[in-house]
Amino acid sequence: MSQRLSGRVALVTGASRGLGRAIAELFAAEGAAVAVLDLKEHWAQTVVDGITAQGGKALAIGCDVSDREAVRAAVARTVEAFGGLDVTVSSAMWNKYEPIAEITPETLARMSGVGFDGIVWMTQAAAPHMARRGGGSMINIASVSALKGMVNALLYCGIKAGVGGLTRAAAVELGAQGIRVNAISPATVATEGVKAMLDEEALAQRKARIPLGRLGETEDIAQTALWLASEGSAFVSGQMITVDGGLANAIL
């Protein structure tokens, strides 16, 4: 590896599997000390064990990102363990896809609590620590669904669109402190969660809509996050970067 994040400290939420795990593992391989956050600490510990076995630095933290004080405590623990904070990746999401008529207050509260509120609390908690280091990079995981509607996904599409607005506003407000804020908007990525939710026919249908003719892989998103975390994107802020094989531009 090129060690593009040598000396950096990163914190990744939703990092026990899927996109978050791939990002945490790549960041560690590129030299970052990584706080691996998920709802249960023992979920995160599995990822940490793999990172440390490869000679990397990592810390497992259990955290419900919808809880403002829990997020603040997780950030403080990261700073105490590694001496600062340079990069955050907000990847945590709790999903339930259902028709509009079936949405309940409980579902709305949990989805928005994890997928939107959690990014607000992370932005708020991390910014002062990044400012003390002269700046940093905040990366939020949105979705191409922020740009395109889907059946049975009113909450998901709405929350991910909100992540885009949050990202742009934070980039404007925090730019003077040297903090860059960007979002990655993937199309369907072939994670274990997606494969468990969609059968082969549904996966094939999604694949057929993508101009590049394949589903995304976790590595596609992790490599984009690495670029946003590194000096290679030093003048990039406030952007929603679609990593979707061309889907957002396709007329279907």
Image (spheres, rainbow, N blue to C red):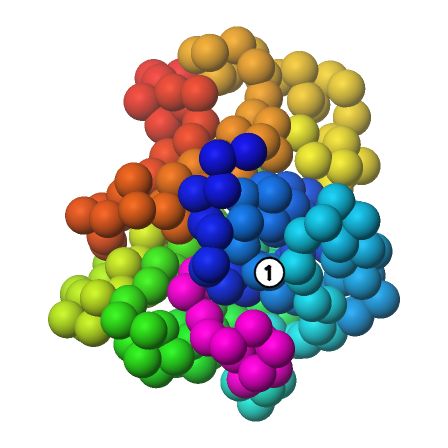
Could you say which quadrant of the image residue 173 lies in?
bottom left
Q: Residues within 10 Å of mark 1 (few under 14, many from 20)?
A: many
User: Which residue is at the front of the view, 157 or 70?
Assistant: 70
Q: Quick check: 130 left or right of 186? A: left
Q: Residue at x 46, y 59 (%)?
A: 8
Q: How many labels, in total?
A: 1
Please tell me whether residue 49 belongs to the stretch shown in magenta. Answer: no
Residue 64 lies, with reference to residue 149, above or below; the image says below
The quarter of the image holding the N terminus is: top right
Q: Residue at x 50, y 63 (%)?
A: 9
Q: Quick check: 12 left or right of 203? A: left
Say which amino acid is labelled 1: Val
The spot of residue 156 in percent (x, y) is 52, 52
Q: Quick check: 112 left or right of 203? A: left
Residue 187 lies, with reference to residue 70, above or below; the image says above
Disc 1 element: strand
Magenta highlight: main SS: helix
User: Which residue is at the front of the view, 213 or 34?
Assistant: 34
The spot of residue 5 in percent (x, y) is 46, 49
The spot of residue 215 in percent (x, y) is 58, 21
Q: Residue at x 77, y 19 (%)?
A: 200
Q: Residue at x 26, y 71 (%)?
A: 134
Residue reaching furthest to the bottom: 69
Residue 132 lies, with reference to residue 175, above or below; the image says below
The quarter of the image holding the C terminus is: top left
**Would you name the residue on which mark 1 appears?**
34
Residue 193 lies, with reference to residue 188, above or below; the image says below
Please tell me whether residue 84 belongs to the stretch shown in magenta. Answer: yes
Magenta stretch in the rendered image = 74-88
- Can I make out residue 39 in this image? no
- Can I make out residue 208 in this image? yes
